[in-house]
Each structure stands twice: as structure tokens, then as C-alpha cells.
Image (cartoon, rainbow, N blue to C red):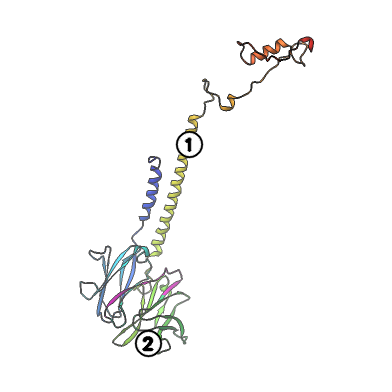
Amino acid sequence: MAADATLPTILLGLCASSVMIKPCIAATCSFTNAHPDVAVASLALYDEPTGPATVTSTAVGFGHTAYLTCKSGVTQYVRAFNGSDTVALVFAQTTAASGGFKCQARNLMSLEPLAWNQTGATLDLTSLGEVAEGTYNLGLVNSGYDGDLVWSEQVVGVGGWTEIGTTTGFNGARVLVRSFSGDVSLIVKAEAINGPEVARSSVFSITSADTGMGAHVHLIEASGVSSLVFVRGCGTAGDNCNACEAGEDFWTALVIGLVVAGFVLATTVVAVYCYCKSSKKDSAIAPDPTSTSNPPPTRFERFRIPEFSLAPVPGYEDVLVGKEQLIRNLRAQFDPQSELVLPADAVMWTDNDI
């Protein structure tokens, strides 16, 4: 039985291993220092929970952002450091279940206060969904106000404010999926619910280079002064840092195709093998019609009733033959060497009786 399954097992094994046939796509990650009590912060990525870092960002001051290359689609371990300290402020993990970092520039991380007016830190890994073609994601993040906020935007040159969303409490966030309809310059403001304006951003632009990317407007606060900073997922002007366009989407489709094709091939091989094996068994028990041996009769041959041939007598071709001829014919049908025994009440007739 084990030998019968060898070929399909090999084929399925090759299909399963083909999942690993995928180039190492480098994604883009951003790291923003939004903690007012951490003057300078850096971020490091690891392939294992312990051991040396594979990537380390540049150190950035409060309110600033660093960009770094990160691995896409695999588990990564993340630590944020305060200045030159060797003990991490925060440890986090991007799990394989969530696919780790994404090949699109939507991996927005920030170091923030653990709670309002606390020195403890937390690392926010903004979870943005896949950015569809022709759209961009805009996050609204509150790391600088202890309360609910209403967010509004103004298109420069048009005037007037349009509400775009609300967030709940400190560290509240919201992600907007927006269609791109042309280059535009915007200003965003955050206001307390039924209260005063908390902060207003500088003018920032959305262009076609922002499609397929994530960005956020981040409210931060230090020493009672609040500000809104605009952070793009890609740090290169005029680019969206999308590593999927010519790489990962193609390879993902190829891997799926190989797995499906391999499964179909393995199933076909098993079906053909079983059919051939069954045919060989049938040919082994079937009688050979050209054989000169006398094989045992089938069930129906065993119980076949003999056919009688009554030979005509000259002059009586159309009538029954005489007694003696009938007896001879009956003997010939059974056993010519044995005597025919007729029933005691058998009626006999002669030629004169006809």
C-alpha cells in the first residue's frame, strides 16, 4: 500500500514545497516618535525573538519619522529603543497569521504614551487593510488629547470644512479608504466634541503617487502644545514604495497555480494507476478464448438444457419419426453407451399408428 502511494506523495510534496518558491520582497516601514518623554527613539527588527537585529532605523526626535526596509509576509519581532539605551522600551511581534508587514507601504508604526500623561510607552502597529488600485488609506490617530475628537478637512482653494470622521478617547484611531480623483491639497483639523479646536495640520498634498499606499494624520502633544503631523507610508516624494507591483502578486498567483496543477496531476495519476491495476486483475481471471484447454463452464453453461434434433424419415419429412429412430436420437443426445430407460407409463407408437 505504501508503494502504491509513492508517486502521488512525491508530487504533492513538490507542490507543497513550491509555496516557498517566492522572491524575498522588501517592503517599506515607517516609524514615528510620538512619545513626548522620549527625546530620541529608534526601532529595530529581528527574524527571531532573540539575537541580532536585521534592520535598525535611524534615531528620530519627537514628532519625526524614519523609514526603513522591512521583510514582507513573514513574522518579525520589533523593539523600540530610547536613544542609545540597550534595553528596549517596547517589544512587539508581527505574527505570521496576519502576514507580518505588507509589500505595500502601509506599515505605519509609532511610539506613543501607554496612557494619557504617563511615561510608559506602547508601540502602535497601525493595521491598514490592503490598498486597492486607485485608492489610498488615510488614518486619523489621536496620541495627544484625552478625549473624543471630530476630524474635518478643507480643500485648499475651495474653502469650507467637511467632517471626515470621529475617534474615541486617547489613542483612538480611524482609517479612511479614499478614492483618488485628482491631485489635491488639504488641511485637516481635530476638534473636541462640542468643544474648541485642538490642532490643525499644515497643508499637505495627495497625488497619484499616494495611491496604493497608507498615510496618517497624527495628533501629538508635548508640554501642553498639540500639533497634527502628516505621515506618508513612503518616505520618497513622488513614489508609493509599492513592492507588490512587479513581484509579490505575480509570485502569489504562480504559487497558487502550481499547487492546483500539482493536485490535479496527482489525482489523475492515482486514477490511471488504479484503473490499470483493476484491468490487470480482470485479465488475470478472464478465460482465454484461444486456449485449447477445457475451462470449467460458467454457471449458466452448467445448467444449459440440451437441444433435441428429430431427424426426418424419408416419406415422413413433415411428421414425427418412428419409435426406433426417436430412441436412437434421444440416446445420441445423452450418452450413446448407455441404455435409455423410459418411464413405465410412456406411450409408444409404431409407423402404423401414424
**Mark 1 or 2 closer to N-term?**
2
Q: Could you tell me which residue is drawn at 33 percent across and 60 percent down?
A: 24
Residue on which the image places disc 1? 278
Magenta residues (range):
119-137
Q: Position of residue 96 (x, y in %)?
A: 35, 62
Q: Which mark is residue 124?
A: none
Q: How many marks?
A: 2
Q: Quadrant of residue 347?
A: top right
Q: Residues within 10 Å of mark 1 (few under 14, many from 20)?
A: few
Nearer to the camera, 139 or 124: 124
| Above or below: residue 84 compared with residue 72 | below
Q: Could you tell me which residue is drawn at 21 percent across and 72 percent down?
A: 87
Nearer to the camera, 248 or 335: 335
Q: Is residue 44 magenta?
A: no
Q: Which mark is residue 198?
A: 2
Going by the numbered disc 1, the residue's amino acid type is Ser
Instruction: Give left or right: position of 327 versus 30.
Output: right
Assign a secondary structure to mark 1. Answer: helix
Which quadrant does the C terminus fall into?
Answer: top right
